Image (tube, coloured by chain):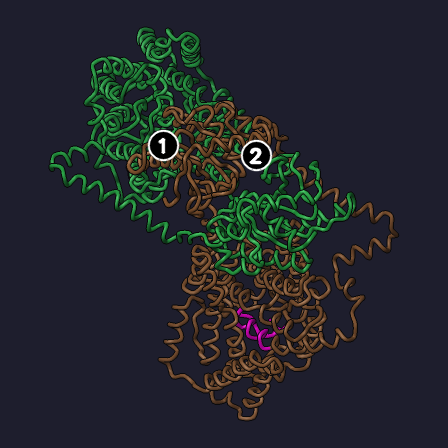
Chain colours: A brown, B green
Amino acid sequence: MTSSTVDTCKFNDLQVDIEKNMPQDVRSQWILNAPEPPSPWHVAADSVRKTVSNFRDKVSSLNHRSCGTVLLSALQVVFPILVWGRSYTAAKFRKDFLAGLTIASLCIPQSIGYATLANLAPQYGLYTSVVPPLIYAVMGTSREIAIGPVAVVSLLLSSMVQKLVDPFTDPVGYTKLIFLATLFAGIFQTSFGLFRLGFLVDFLSHAAIVGFVAGAAIVIGLQQLKGLFGITHFTTKTDIISVLKAVWEAFHNPWNPHNFILGGSFLVFILTTRFLGKRKKNLFWLASIAPLVSIIISTLAVYLTRADKNGVKIVKHVKAGLNPISINQLDFNSPHVVDVAKIGLVVAVVALTESVAVGRSFASIKGYQLDGNKEMMSIGFTNIIGSLTSCYVATGSFSRTAVNYAAGCESLISNIVMAITVMISLQFLTNLLYYTPIAIIASVILSALPGLIDITEAYKIWKVDKLDFLACIGAFFGVLFASVEIGLLVAVVISFTKILLISIRPSTETLGKLPGTDLFCDVDQYPMAIQIPGVIIIRMKSALLCFANANFVKERIMKWVTHEESEDNKGNSKSAIQLVILETSNLVNIDTSGIASLEELYKSLSSQGKQLAIVNPRWQVIHKLKVSKFVDKIGGRVYLTVEEAIVAGCKSNQF
Amino acid sequence: MTSSTVDTCKFNDLQVDIEKNMPQDVRSQWILNAPEPPSPWHVAADSVRKTVSNFRDKVSSLNHRSCGTVLLSALQVVFPILVWGRSYTAAKFRKDFLAGLTIASLCIPQSIGYATLANLAPQYGLYTSVVPPLIYAVMGTSREIAIGPVAVVSLLLSSMVQKLVDPFTDPVGYTKLIFLATLFAGIFQTSFGLFRLGFLVDFLSHAAIVGFVAGAAIVIGLQQLKGLFGITHFTTKTDIISVLKAVWEAFHNPWNPHNFILGGSFLVFILTTRFLGKRKKNLFWLASIAPLVSIIISTLAVYLTRADKNGVKIVKHVKAGLNPISINQLDFNSPHVVDVAKIGLVVAVVALTESVAVGRSFASIKGYQLDGNKEMMSIGFTNIIGSLTSCYVATGSFSRTAVNYAAGCESLISNIVMAITVMISLQFLTNLLYYTPIAIIASVILSALPGLIDITEAYKIWKVDKLDFLACIGAFFGVLFASVEIGLLVAVVISFTKILLISIRPSTETLGKLPGTDLFCDVDQYPMAIQIPGVIIIRMKSALLCFANANFVKERIMKWVTHEESEDNKGNSKSAIQLVILETSNLVNIDTSGIASLEELYKSLSSQGKQLAIVNPRWQVIHKLKVSKFVDKIGGRVYLTVEEAIVAGCKSNQF
C-alpha cells in the first residue's frame, strides 16, 4: 500500500470542526428518522396510478374539445404524418424525391439478393420494399430510416425456418411459414411497444451487436460466393467451415469462371465508386447509382451476348405484378406454429434492435428524440400488414438509411418515393430483370458488407472494456462457427453473466482521507489518500448486499481486518485495528441474508474487541437495518460521515 | 417535493471555501491522473499468482523441516482431530459420552423413519448413522454438527430417483441408484471444496431456505400420515393435493384406528416432554430420551398384546449386522447415469446448504470460524466413503445438532459415541425392533417437524424485505403444491431475478445539500436537503451503467430534466436547468453501451444549451471515460465534489 499514515492527534481537531457546524446527535437523527421509503407495492401502485392519471388527464383535456378535434388528435398520435405533413413544402419534396430515387436504385438489387438469402423467390424481396415503406411512412417517428428487407434478418429467418421446412423441396410450405413468422414478429413488436417493453431491445449490448453484425456480414458474404462463382450445389448451413467446404468441393468439379469475372469486375467498379464518393463529396451520386448502373450494363451485356448459354447464371423469371394478398397463406394449424412463434420472437427483437439503433443514431445527429415504444409499434404494425401482403420481415436498413441521409432526405416521403419506384418496377420492369446475372446481385450485396464490419469500434471496445470485448468476440465467433442463433445466445449469455458476476463477487476497497478535504476515497485510486491508524474504512463495490454476496463480503472484510493487523505487526509499530467502518453510501439495497451476515460480522468483530460503525446508509438500507433491530444491536453507531464515525470511535475508545 | 430551495448567492461563498483549501485544478488532476486500474487479466493473474506463492511459501517453509514433520502437518490439515485430539481430556469425554448417547437415542428412530421417507429398507438409515459420523469426526472442523440422514435430503432423493426406477417394483435397482447418487453427491461436494466453489451454497438465499424447509417439513409430515394411519395404498407423489387425496381415499376404505391411537398418544407424549424441556432446563433430558422411551414402551406393548395381529403395522424384519460393502452395487453402465449425476448435483448443494447453515450458526454462537471449503470437502469425502458402505447421503442434521449442543457436547467425539451406539444396535438389537409400530416412528419424525417451520423468521422477512418474502413464499408453495425440485427452482429463480431487476431497472435520485454540511444527499431520504435552482444533481441507484440499463437511465434523466423545468415554470419563478450534475460515486463500472448513452445524453443536453458535469467517478469509470475520450468531449468537466462542479458551472455560466 502506497498511502502514508498520519498521527491520530490530527483527528482530534476534526471533532471541533464538526461540532462547530452542528451537534452530531442531530445529524444521526437525520439518518435514523428519515421518512419510510416506499414499499415495492407502493412503487408498483404509484407507477400504475401515474399511467392511469396521465391517461385520465388526456381524456379530460379532450372532453373540452369537439368530437372532431378528439378524433384528429388521436389520429395524429397514430399517424405522425398528419402533423409534419402540414408543414411539408415543395422544396422538401424535391430533396425527398431525389433521395427516394437514390435509395430505390440501391433497394431493387438488394431486395432481390436478400430474398435469395432468405431462400425466397426474388419478387418477395421487392414486395417487402413496397408495402412496409408505405405503412411506416405514415406511422413512423424517424425522418431518415429506409424500411425494407435487411441482410441480417433475412439470414436469421432462413437459418431458423429451414430447420422446420426445407425451402428447396417444399418452397410453398416454407414461404407460408415465413409469412407466419413475419406476422408473429409484427405482433410481438407491436405488443413490446404497447406494453412499454422497449428495454428488451437493450438486452443486446452495443458490443454484442458490433460482434454479431460483423460475424453476420462475413456469413452473408460467404453465402454470396454461391452467386459469385455460379455454384449449383451449395450447403444450407451458414457456418464458415461448412460454407468453405462447399466452395472447395465446387472447385473440384468443373466450374465456369464467367460468373466470377463478371461479378468480380463489377464489384471492383462499385467499390471504386464508393471510395471516390467518400473522398469527394460531389461524387456521392456516382457511388449511389453504381449498383443500378452495374445491373443495367451487365443485364444488357448478357442479353446482347447471350452469355447465359455459356454458363452465366441469371435471375430468370421474376413474377410481375404488385403484392398479392397472402392472408389465406397464414396457416395457424401448422404443426410448427409454436416453433414459428419462437422464431417470430427472436426475429422481432433482432429486427427492432437494428431499426432502433439506426433510428437513434440518426436522430441524435439531427438532434431530435425518437420515441422507442412508438417506433416499435410502427415497425410491428408494418410487419403485421406486410405478412398479409406477401412481405417478409422488414425493418430499418442501415446501408439504405445512410444513403438516404447522405442523399439529403427531409422526411419519410423519400420512403414513399422509393416504394412507388419499386412498385413501377414490379408492374412493368420485371421482364428486364430476366437477364440480370446473379453474380451482379451478389456483388451489390458484397459491396454493402464492409460497412458492417466495424474494426475501429471493435478496437475501441477492446481498449475501453475487456469483458465487453469478450461479448463482442463471442457473438462474432458464435455466428461464424456455429449459427446465427448461437451467436445471439452467446452474446446475451456473456452480457448477463457479466452483470451477475459483478453482483455476486463484488470487490471491496479501503478508503483514506484526501489531504485538504473531508473526502474519504479509495486508496488505490488516490495514492495520496491518508489512512488512519487503528481504523479501517471499507466500502464494497456493489449496489446490493444480498444472499449471493453477503457471505463472501463478510469473509473478505474479516480477512482484510486480520491481514491489516498482521501487516502492521511486521512493518510499522504495532497498531491493532480498533474500529471497522463500513462506508455503505453506494449500497442501494440489502436483503435478509445481507443483514444476517452483517450481524455475524458484528459478532466476530465484537469477540475480538473491535467496534463496527455504519456510515451514510441509503434510504432502503437504513430502513431495513432499523426494522431488523441491527441499529440497536451495534449500539446506534450509524453516522453521516466517516469523520463523525472516527471521532465517535475516538471518544468511546480513547485510542 | 418537500425540500426547499435557497438563493444561489450562497454558493458564491462556497468557491472561496474550496479555493482556500486547495486549488481546484490540482484536485481535478487527482481524478484524471489516477493510476491505471488493474485489467481483468491482471486481476485474474494476480489471484493465481497469490495462490501459487501461498503454496510455494508453505512448501518452502516445509523444506526446513524433517520429512516426518511435513507429513504430520499435511495430515493435520486433512484430519483436524490430530490437532484438537491432543488437548482432549477425560472431563470433555464425559460430556461427549452423554451427548453421544442422547443423540443416538434420537438418531435410531429418526434413521429408520428417514430411510422409509427415502423409500429404502430401515437398515440403510441406520447404516448412514454409522460410517458418516465416524469419517466426519476425524475430518470435520465443526464441533457440534451431528452427521447422519436428514429429512429434507431423504425426501428430495426419493422424489427424484423414483422418477427413474420404481422403488416398489424394483427395490434393488432403486437402492443401487441411490448409492450412485450418493457417490456423485460426494464427488460434487468434494470438488466444490477443492475448487473453492463454496459460493454455490450461497445461491439459496436465507429467505428461500426458510420457505423451502417449512414447505418440506409439511410435505414430510404429510408423508408420515401413511404410517400414522396405517394406510396401505399411498401415493408416490409428494405434493399436498395428491397426498390429501390419497389420505381421503384411504378413509373411504375400512381402516384400523389402532395405529392412529397408538401413534397419536405417543406424539402427544413426546411434544409434552419437549414443551416441558423448553420451559425448565433441568427437564431437558426428558425431552431428549422421550423418543427412545416411546419406542421401547410401544414395542413392548405391541409384543405383549400381539397388537400386530389386530392391524397395528410394525417395522418387522430389520437386517442385522454392520454396513455391508456396496462398492459392487455402483453401476456406472446404468442408462440413468447422467440423470443420477444431475440428482447428485442437486442433492449435493441442498445437503451442503443445510450442513453449512447448521455449522455456521453454532460456530458463531461459540465464537469460532468455520472453513466453508474444508467443510465441503469433509462432507463430500464422508459421502464418497458412505456410498461404498451402503449409506445414502448424510449431512449435518439440524434437530440432532441442536440436541447435541444442548446436551453439552464438547467435540466431534460425541458423533463417534453415537456411531458406536448405533453399531451395537445394528449388531445385537435389530430383533428387538421387529415389533416397533410404524406409527411410533412416524410420531418421532412428526415431533421434529414443528421446529422446521419458522413462522417468526418468516414474519421478520416479511417486515424487512417484501421481495425476499416473495422468494420465501414461492419456495414454500413450490414445495407444497408442485414438488421439492420445483420449490428449489422457484426460490433460485426469484432470488436471481431480483438481482437482475435491480441492475436492469435502477431508479435515480436527485440530491440536495444537507444544511450545515458539505454533503449532498437524496432529497427523498433527507427532506431537509436543499436543492439549488438551475442545477439538477442526479445519482443512479446502481453499481453498473451497462447495456441493460444505460438507455433507460439516459431517458429517465432527460425526462427528469424536462419535468423539473416544466414544474418550475408552473409554480415558482422560471428557472431553466442550466447544469446537470451526474454524481457517479456509487457507479463501480461502466461498459461501452453506458459510455455511448452518456455521449447521447451530453449531445441532447448540449442541443438544449445545458451543461453536463461528472462528479467523483470511481477508478474503473474514470479510466474508461478517459480512454473513450468522453472526458475531452465534455470539456474536462469532471470534479471531485458536487460543490466544485457547481462553482465551476457558476463561473462559466454566470447564472
- The segment highlighted magenta reads A109-127
Q: Nearer the viewer, residue A382 or B277?
A: B277
Q: Pointer 2 and pointer 1: residues touching (CB < 8 Å)?
A: no
A594 within the magenta span: no
Q: Residue B308: in sight, yes or no? A: no
Report x, y in % for residue A175. Answer: 57, 66
Which residue bears the numbered disc 1?
A: B351
Q: Nearer the viewer, mark 2 or mark 1?
A: 2
Q: Residue B410: in sight, yes or no? A: yes
Tell me if A249 is positioned left or right of B249 in this view: left
Which residue bears the numbered disc 2?
A: A620
Give the structural element (helix, strand or loop) at label 1. helix
Dot 1 falls on which chain?
A: B
Kind of residue at disc 1: Ala
Give the structural element (helix, strand or loop) at label 2. helix
Report x, y in % for residue A79. Answer: 75, 60
Q: Nearer the viewer, residue A314 or B628?
A: B628
Tell me if A249 is positioned left or right of A498 in this view: left
Q: Nearer the viewer, residue B299 or A424?
A: A424
Q: Quadrant of residue B182?
A: top left
Whether labels 2 and 1 share one chain:
no
* Mark 1 crowdedness (10 Å alpha carbons): few <14, some 14-19, many ≥20: many
